[in-house]
Image (cartoon, rainbow, N blue to C red):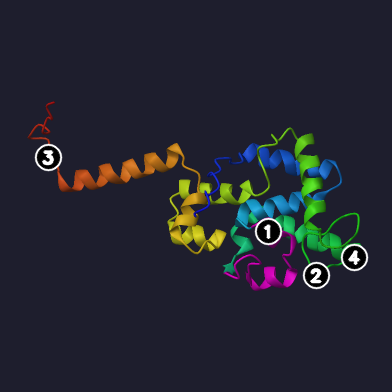
Amino acid sequence: MELASLPERDQSWTVDQVHAIKAKAHEMSRPSIALAVSIAYWLGHRQGDVLTMTWTALTAGERRTRKTGAKAVFVTSAYPELAAELAAEKARQEASNTASTHAVVCEMTKQPWQADTFRHEFRRIATAAAIPASLQFRDLRATAATELSNAGADVIDMSTHTTHQTVQMARRYARRTPEQFKRAAGKRLAARNKTEPNDGKTEPKSVTC
């Protein structure tokens, strides 16, 4: 007997919402939440991988994901905003004599966040930032995939960010958008024009119904 699959989520963060929750996190003295949001948004990583991200992995530019063991490769310098935030957090940890092996550290315990505590604090800040309850931390990962797809990235580019191992899963995470449709239509028309050139001397063929 087959179990019904979970319905496909369609939620995606806007750039303004990402900025809003990061600003609110700083305002509420939780810069670690802002950094976690940035890592998830720019790199497309799962919450578990964000909370366990080490400085060693960031320096190496690779790690194994906790859920599937897939190899994740990332170049943080490719995203200047993220690189600046990581550098600021590294400097803050060193200056406060609370340097950690991890990038995202709870302000209260000075230790890496526990998953349940992080979820609770994230939602508290999201609510204060007027982020709808339907929009979750995991949707940052899908937002990364969607923005990559909108920008014209192929499935290889997308999966390098998100570490998905199949085309089906990468497709599931990349929300369907008008930008994707228009890009595909543009490619279709460009290909059609190449195969049916019109030199201006003849009228295009008409189609009758």
Q: Which residues are magenta?
A: 46-70
The residue at which mark 1 appears reads as: 83
Residue found farthest to the left: 202
Q: CA distance from mark 4 to mark 2?
A: 10 Å
Label 4 close to label 3 by CB (< 8 Å): no
Q: Amino acid at mark 3?
A: Asp
Query: Would residue 2 appear left or right of 18 to someone viewing this image?
Result: left
Within 10 Å of the Cα at label 2, are there few (<14), some (14-19), or many (20+) other Cα atoms? some
> Mark 3 or mark 2, which is nearer the start of the sequence?
2
Within 10 Å of the Cα at label 4, are there few (<14), some (14-19), or many (20+) other Cα atoms? few
Name the residue rendered at 14%, 44% in the picture: 196
Q: Amino acid at mark 4?
A: Thr
> Mark 3 or mark 4, which is nearer the start of the sequence?
4
Query: Would residue 85 appear left or right of 182 to someone viewing this image?
Result: right
The residue at which mark 4 appears reads as: 98
The residue at which mark 2 appears reads as: 101
Element carrying mark 3: loop
Name the residue rendered at 46%, 62% in the picture: 166
Element carrying mark 4: loop
Residue found farthest to the front: 1
